[in-house]
Image: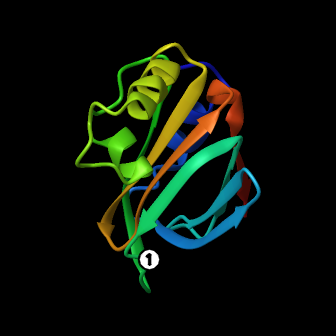
Amino acid sequence: MTAGSPQALIHPFELHDGLLTGISVGAKHVELRCLHETGDILLISIKGITRFRATDFLEGNTINRISIYCGVQCPSDLIPFVFQMEDKPDHPALIEARTAVLLGRSVVLELEPSYGCYAVALAEGGLSSISVERHK
């Protein structure tokens, strides 16, 4: 992990038990607004979105963890989930997306909840697609 990489920016703030308070979706852009238990706000911006899926957005969405996959094999269920093709794991579009992540051309961000919203984003551009801002 290098300084300034998305993992380096998200990890130090330990968002475990933080709250996902908002999702903003625009043309090829998603922003996740998170509240740390200290009161700090983290804005996770994902550009180059090709797919985004979120389920169960509720009052009090508690974050268990945020994981980023780029240049590595991501869990086999994430790509089918974000494409809503869980029943077609060998579809050519899914194979192409998995390959792009493995080669570092695309990135997957997974927000796993303890309660509430589960979200997966797939974006072109590798790790440079994700930025994090911290506000006190």
Nearer-the-camera pick, 101 or 65: 101
Kindly identify the amino acid type of the residue bearing the numbered disc 1: Phe
Q: Residue at x 35, y 21 (%)?
A: 73
Residue situated furthest bottom in the rendering: 59
Q: Residue at x 53, y 64 (%)?
A: 36
- Observer able to see residue 4: no
- Observer able to see residue 5: yes
**Quadrant including the C terminus:** bottom right
Image coordinates of residue 42 in percent, x first then y, are: 64, 58
Q: Residue at x 77, y 57 (%)?
A: 27
Label 1: which secondary element = loop
What residue does disc 1 label? 57
The answer to whether residue 121 is above or below residue 90 is: below
Q: How is the image coloured?
A: rainbow
Q: Residue at x 40, y 33 (%)?
A: 94
On screen, residue 75 versus residue 59, left or right, reads left
Image coordinates of residue 81 in percent, x first then y, are: 35, 50
Q: Quadrant of residue 115?
A: bottom left
The answer to whether residue 124 is above or below residue 117 is: above
The answer to whether residue 16 is above or below residue 79 is: below
Nearer-the-camera pick, 120 or 6: 120
